[in-house]
């Protein structure tokens, strides 16, 4: 070996391969989750507003097409929600291209609520006919022998219902903000409450399947997780709300300070609990 020359590390390829596998698993988990179909709708609902209609529509459509492309590349079946999303956003994009200035103003005001309401109706109808839309995603990761079990069916009914309620709530508060405040950009009705509903539904989606399995196996001395886990996102969210409200001057300094204090205290308690759990 030449003096002063270090041979290339042989660990780099294995590390790169490991990272790729980790990222690949994370991507597959996202694509196999209802979130992959829901994210474009959430983007459209939250981003839509005065001067942002095109950004919201094309952003949602682009994300939907990206999900479809990744599904195909990774041999993951396309789900109804994803196909519906592409069709929905194509229609909105086409309408935006031919809309008059008055029609465009209407779309900027109400397209977010239309999006939330449409997804809420879709989720609710799927539950009412006994075929919750989340079932297609769950079948991608659950063995076929479990598809007809009461546990599998009940879990999907609960998760799909939570999403229907979350988007129905978002549509309602968005409508309230548009009517009462005359603005889609109200800090509370246009952003905070809708994001809170989204985070809550995500938390339930991640928590409930594990909870349902543990509860079903409780007779075998399995520990049933606490529902408090569903609200672990709340303290950091309250903290972020206080900071955002203060920076944007949408809430008073006193209210912002209260939110920051409460959020920081709650976040500290969560971290302390996690540290204790690791020790024990």
Image (tube, helix red, strand yellow):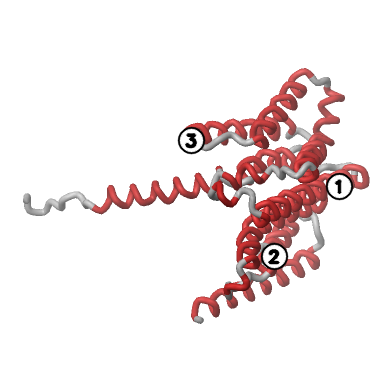
Residue 116 seen anywhere in this rendered image of the structure: no
Residue where numbered disc 3 is placed: 75
Label 1 and label 3: CA atoms lie apart by 38 Å
Counting residues from the start of the chain, the first of labels 1 and 2 encountered is 1
What secondary structure is found at the residue carrying circle 3? Answer: loop
State which quadrant residue 88 falls in.
Answer: top right
Residue where numbered disc 2 is placed: 231
Q: Is residue 209 left or right of residue 20?
A: right
Residue where numbered disc 1 is placed: 172
Residue 151 seen anywhere in this rendered image of the structure: yes
Nearer to us of marks 1 and 3 is 3
Q: Position of residue 58 (x, y in %)?
A: 66, 30
Q: Is residue 61 above or below residue 100?
A: below
Q: Position of residue 190 (x, y in %)?
A: 79, 47
Q: Position of residue 165 (x, y in %)?
A: 79, 51
What count of labels does the image hold?
Answer: 3
Label 3 and label 2: CA atoms lie apart by 34 Å
What secondary structure is found at the residue carrying circle 2? Answer: helix
Residue that appears at 19% across and 49% down: 8
Residue that appears at 75% across and 68% down: 257
Q: Position of residue 101 (x, y in %)?
A: 83, 23
């Amino acid at each position: 070996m030449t003096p002063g020359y270090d041979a290339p590390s042989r660990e780099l390829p294995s590390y790169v391969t490991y990272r790729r596998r980790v990222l690949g698993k994370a991507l597959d988990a996202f694509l196999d989750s209802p979130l992959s179909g829901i994210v474009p709708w959430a983007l459209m609902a939250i981003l839509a507003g005065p001067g942002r209609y095109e950004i919201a529509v094309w952003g949602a459509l682009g994300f939907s097409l990206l999900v479809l492309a990744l599904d195909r590349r990774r041999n993951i079946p396309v789900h109804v929600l994803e196909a519906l999303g592409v069709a929905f956003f194509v229609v909105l994009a086409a309408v935006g291209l031919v809309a008059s200035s008055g029609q465009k103003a209407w779309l900027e005001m109400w397209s977010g609520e239309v999006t939330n309401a449409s997804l809420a109706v879709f989720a609710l109808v799927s539950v009412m006919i006994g075929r919750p839309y989340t079932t297609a995603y769950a079948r991608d990761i659950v063995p076929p022998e479990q598809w007809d079990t009461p546990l599998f069916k009940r879990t999907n009914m609960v998760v799909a219902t939570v999403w229907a309620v979350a988007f129905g709530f978002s549509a309602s508060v968005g409508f309230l903000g548009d009517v009462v405040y005359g603005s889609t950009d109200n800090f509370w009705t246009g952003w905070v409450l809708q994001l809170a509903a989204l985070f809550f539904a995500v938390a339930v989606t991640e928590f409930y399947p594990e909870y349902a399995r543990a509860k079903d196996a409780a007779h075998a001395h399995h520990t049933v997780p606490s529902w408090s886990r569903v609200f672990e996102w709340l303290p950091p969210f309250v903290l972020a709300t206080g900071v955002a409200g203060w920076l944007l001057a949408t809430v008073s300094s006193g209210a912002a300070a209260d939110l920051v204090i409460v959020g920081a205290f709650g976040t500290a308690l969560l971290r302390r609990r996690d540290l204790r759990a690791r020790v024990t």
